[in-house]
Image: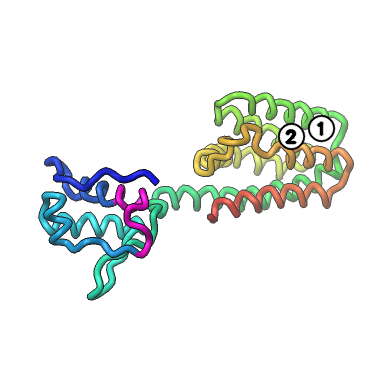
Amino acid sequence: MSSPPPLGSLRPSPLAEQAAEQLRAQITSGHWPVGTKLPGETTLARTLGVGRSTVREAVRALAGSGLLRSRQGAGVFVIATEAAEDWPTRLRRAAVADVYEVRSMVEIHAARLAAARRTDSDLAAMNTALEGRRAAASGADDAAFVDADIALHAAVVAAAHNPVLTDLFDRFVPVLREGLIELVALLGLRGHDPNHGDEPHTALVAAVRWGDADAAGRILQAEISATVGLLGK
């Protein structure tokens, strides 16, 4: 385990932020493991070359990140070595989860209908979209991959031959696109697998081709549920 930089006097500027960063380095490096009691305020203030009020502010910031906890009469203790997600990130996750709730209502029903109503031209459109998704996966552009993914799902919805569902999906696409781009960024889905989700999408097209409505709905439900589960972690 690498050693963190030693604590040292700070430069003028936002002193509390600098103090928090130095203390965070001690924690995240493992120098102060979970359960460790931090040195007292006076000791930390002297080591960092700041006032005790600055130390208190830095400790509050790290407590807000989920790294420290103050225990009345006992001191300040390390409770985690990785910061909890900040509020904006939590809001982004919640927003994407909301998008997926609506997606579930529209697309699962559409997939079941598509399995019963698809035509040869619908199947050709889905196959073309599936290949387009695979082609987009070879590039590093997440937005292009998301657009290709949406095109495949749009082809499945179109195969349901329900104009209301098609209109709902079309109106939903801008929000869905934004949500999917956020999803890829939040979860790093393409970091290890640039063609993330190819297997279930291939299975979805196959289920529609064979007219298996139950399988089509089940595959899409499983894909959406798995993604929502990742968002909840």
Image position of 96 (left or right of 61): right
Image position of 71 (left or right of 143): left
- Residue 184 location (% of width, % of height): 55, 39
Q: Which residues make up the magenta segment?
A: 24-35
**Is residue 221 visible in the rendered structure shown here?**
yes
Depth order, front residue of 114/32: 32
Question: Please, what secondary structure does the residue beneath circle 1 have?
Answer: helix
Name the mark on residue 199. none
Q: How many marks overall? A: 2
Instruction: Identify which amino acid the numbered label 2 is placed on.
Output: Ala
**Is residue 157 visible in the rendered structure shown here?**
no
Residue marked by disc 1: 122
Q: Is residue 178 above or below residue 83?
A: above
Residue marked by disc 2: 155
Residue found at x 75% / y 46%: 110
Q: Is residue 218 magenta?
A: no
Depth order, front residue of 1/65: 1
Question: Please, what secondary structure does the residue beneath circle 2 have?
Answer: helix
- Residue 221 location (% of width, % of height): 71, 51
Mark 2 vs mark 1: which is more N-terminal? 1
Image position of 86 (left or right of 131): left
User: Residue 41 is drawn in which quadrant?
Assistant: bottom left
Residue found at x 62% / y 32%: 194
**Scheme by which the image is coloured:** rainbow
Residue found at x 77% / y 43%: 162
User: Residue 120 is drawn in which quadrant?
Assistant: top right
- CB contact under 8 Å: marks 2 and 1: yes
Crowding near the residue tagged with mark 1, few <14, some 14–19, many ≥20 C-alpha atoms within 10 Å? many
Cα–Cα span, label 2 and label 1 = 7 Å
